[in-house]
Amino acid sequence: MESTKKLVSEFLDHLHSRADASFKGRLHQAFIAWYVEAEFGDVKWDFTDDVNDSGIDAVIWNSEDNPPVTIIQSKFTENFGKGRLGKHAYAEFRSVIDAFRHGDERFDKLVAAARSDLRRIYRRAHETLGKGDNWFQKKKAFRLITSRLPRRKYQFGDIPADHFLHGDEILRLYSDFRQAQTPRARDLTLRIDDKLSYRQGPRGVTSYLFSAQLSDFRKYLQTYDVPRLLARNIRYDLGSRVGESIKKTYENSPHDFWYFHNGLTIICDDFIERNKEATLVAPSVVNGAQTLYAISTSKNKASPALVPVKVIVRAEASSHAVEDDQWLQDIIRSVNSQNRVRKSDLRSNEPEQVLLQSKFREMRVYYERKRGEWRVVRNEPRYRNHERLSLVSLGQILTATNAPDGMGVLTVKKGVDDVFDDPNYKKLFPRRSLVARRFERIYLSYRIATFLENFGYRNATERRKLRHGFWSTLWLVHSSITAAVRYSVVDTSSIKRAFDHLEARSSVPAREARKAVREAVATVWGRMAKSSFTRPRLVDSK
């Protein structure tokens, strides 16, 4: 409950900042703009919300999606999750859907009631959606979003059930969104007795070095959770023994803490010092994730432990967001050297990775974009029945199966950094909209790899022994299956049902499928063992 309150508070802070910057303080409009960005990314869209909008608040255009237009109605209140959406809201939205579905005088009436500047937009949306006769696809064009709780009895079946997004669903979306787009943290106040300062002329950056009370951070974390203060850090809690040692020193040997710890690095927008206290405006801890996670769970809220702190105050002239400033990103990479930064870590906040996390969640798979992320969320009830898939594993699977000639196997064998280096990464994960369109293919590759892993070997011992041939076998099995797949007539739900059936039952098709992958494993391994497996496209080499 407490974590939900923190998330709601943070979400409202984010909306207030967005409203003040772009919408003259109008939170309901900021809410719509946030949703479009979180769900669809960088797309063209028209903001229609205002008087005489005929029940339509936004129209999104994306020719690469199916359907190529999305129509949104929004109902927002700051009392998040406090009260249920009214019957009228459902009825109003249903009338919008009926107008677009059936056309005739109903659509003419909707257009006539709209402001003159919106009529052209609505007609274009109607014309775009009108192409083709498949309502199964067209109904996916409508979404009702609200911060209120649902009234299930007033929902209707004209659109998919998951296109009604109420308070809980919105918070889940924000929880994913914030991992890549964390709003600015609240000001952090630290007590200081003395400090060293350094100003770099060309960049206009001022930095400070001082010792801070670690209990000041612990106090801050009573109100705000760790990920918010970490802001743009590229990893979460890695769960190493280092964290246990940090907590033990903090609690049992606080006076040794300063000597044993390398220190925290914080980037902020301003540094205001008064009466032996420094207020850091919009702080972001870019090195110190393990420390913050360690002390956040400690019962000791008043430890005398001191920690070295380096504060970098961004130049006033800089208008770029932290994630867009290459120099600051270089700092983040450099100071996070205690645990090696992998190239996959640097990809974890890309828009397409955030989208994939949302897509896989719909399939009850937790896609771990950031190392250590699963440790943070695995005990949440909503994820207890989820499979786990890491960014690294997906990258390897897609690399091994992507090239028709099998050369992706060689890339996987060279190492993880080669998988996530350009240009290979961009082949696997192009822009966000294309990844969305390719998700069926991505999900199918994942399920094939999982099926091979679970049923291609008689036992764990054989799996370890024959592991060297796994990627070649995956390429071979994937090529055989996808040669017969028509992606235009399958979707993720049908793929899921098929593989769930093969994995859970002992029917004839299931037994035949398991027998086939074991034969593939044996064939590949036999050819490798005889050293006759020489074609470059199928070679496994270190």
Image: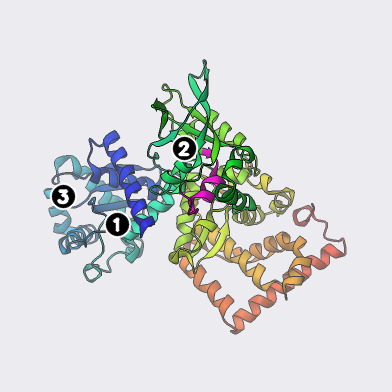
Residue 521 visible to the viewer: yes
Q: Which mark is residue 143?
A: 1
What residue did someone put label 2 on? Answer: 284
Residue 292 part of the magenta segment: yes
Mark 3 neighbour class, 10 Å CA radius: few under 14, some 14 to 19, many 20 or more? many
C-beta proximity under 8 Å, tags 1 and 3: no
| Residue furthest bottom as drawn | 507
Report the side of 312 relative to 15 (left or right). Answer: right
Of the numbered discs 1 and 3, the one sitting upstream in the chain is: 3
What residue did someone put label 3 on? Answer: 111
Q: CA distance from mark 1 to mark 3?
A: 19 Å
The image quarter containing residue 517 is bottom right
- Kind of residue sitting beneath label 3: Val
Q: Position of residue 236 (x, y in %)?
A: 54, 49
Query: Which is in the foreground here, disc 3 or disc 2?
Result: 2
Of 68 and 27, nearer the camera is: 27
- Kind of residue sitting beneath label 1: Arg
**Bounds of the magenta span?**
286-301
- Identify the element where label 1 is drawn: strand
Of 113 and 505, nearer the camera is: 505
What residue is drawn where x is 55% and y is 37%? 307
Of the numbered discs 1 and 2, the one sitting upstream in the chain is: 1
Of the numbered discs 3 and 2, the one sitting upstream in the chain is: 3
